[in-house]
Amino acid sequence: MTLWLPDGPDLVVHGDNLAVTAQLPDAAFRLIYLDPPFNTGRRQTLQRTTTVRSATGSRVGFQGARYETVKSTLYGYDDRFEDYWEFLEPRLEEAWRLLDERGTLYLHLDYREVHYAKVALDALFGRECFLNEIVWAYDYGARSRSRWPSKHDTILVYVKDPDGYHFDAAAVDREPYMAPGLVTPEKAALGKLPTDVWWHTIVSPTGSEKTGYATQKPRGILRRIVQASSAPGDWVLDFFAGSGTTGAVAAELGRRFVLVDSNPDAIDVMRSRLGAATAFVETAREGAS
């Protein structure tokens, strides 16, 4: 059975992404977004906290009843690698193979590995194919008192052909000027095109966008990527799909998508998020993803 056909339905594959991508044809995708594990050295989880009655609980409530706080894990995955680049490099090679001649790769990492990734992608694509280093800045979470708090991720952008890639600045949602009084009222009303620094909040733990997946990325970040580097009808690939934000945004904007993940928690989230029109396929899940 053929895993994927360009005239088939949107697709989610449950399996090892290296094995799955090996079954996809060359130059099949206009846009590839990858948000791999960041190699944080710990297990990533999303926990739910509930309060239950307990005879030994430390909290005392109405009429002397005792309660304790219980934490349970909703979703999680392991983000620990003995050799991270042995894991990631062959997947980047697959991404290069799968991009069409006008295609673009967005690789989303943080400070731990992004500098090594830049060197690896320069070698794989060619330095002339480097398009941007996007800084996604946010302001949420714990704050270190022993160093400057880390409040940004980095997205490296590479194109298959530096003389013929797809980029549609006019399709991208504009953002407000930081100093609207310095431009004409007409420009202030229109807004400005984003630069390579994107200020955008993370997914709110209490917001309507939240799926419950530990490393879910905001729709606004993926929307900007999909708008700029693909057109309606184009195929988009994400083989570290997680909560499925890439697919949700692609569908909203009239693009087609293939998503891959080996984590059953991720597949459960995507089943409830992406609708009945999406095909789900089970395949081999050897190795990490």
Image (cartoon, rainbow, N blue to C red):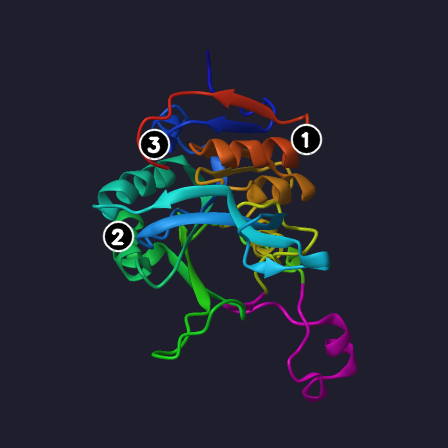
Q: Quadrant of residue 8?
A: top right
Q: CA distance from mark 2 to mark 3?
A: 18 Å
Q: Is residue 187 above or below residue 124?
A: below
| Cβ atoms under marks 1 and 2 closer than 8 Å | no
Residues rendered magenta in the picture: 174-200
Can residue 216 be spotted in the picture?
A: no
Q: Give whichever of discs 1 and 2 has the lower sequence position.
A: 2
Mark 3 sits on what residue? 18
Q: Is residue 80 above or below residue 177?
A: above
Q: Quadrant of residue 99?
A: top left
Element at label 2: helix
Q: Position of residue 205 (x, y in %)?
A: 61, 56
Q: Position of residue 98 (x, y in %)?
A: 40, 35
Amino acid found under the numbered disc labelled 3: Leu
Q: Give whichever of discs 2 and 3 has the lower sequence position.
A: 3
Q: Is residue 176 magenta?
A: yes
Mark 1 sits on what residue? 275
Amino acid found under the numbered disc labelled 2: Ala
Q: CA distance from mark 1 to mark 2?
A: 37 Å
The front one of 219 and 60 is 60
Q: Position of residue 141 (x, y in %)?
A: 51, 67
Q: CA distance from mark 3 to mark 1?
A: 26 Å
The front one of 123 and 36 is 36
Q: Is residue 53 left or right of residue 281?
A: right
Mark 2 sits on what residue? 120
Q: Give whichever of discs 3 and 1 has the lower sequence position.
A: 3
The residue at the point 26 percent across, 46 percent down is: 81
The front one of 153 and 251 is 153
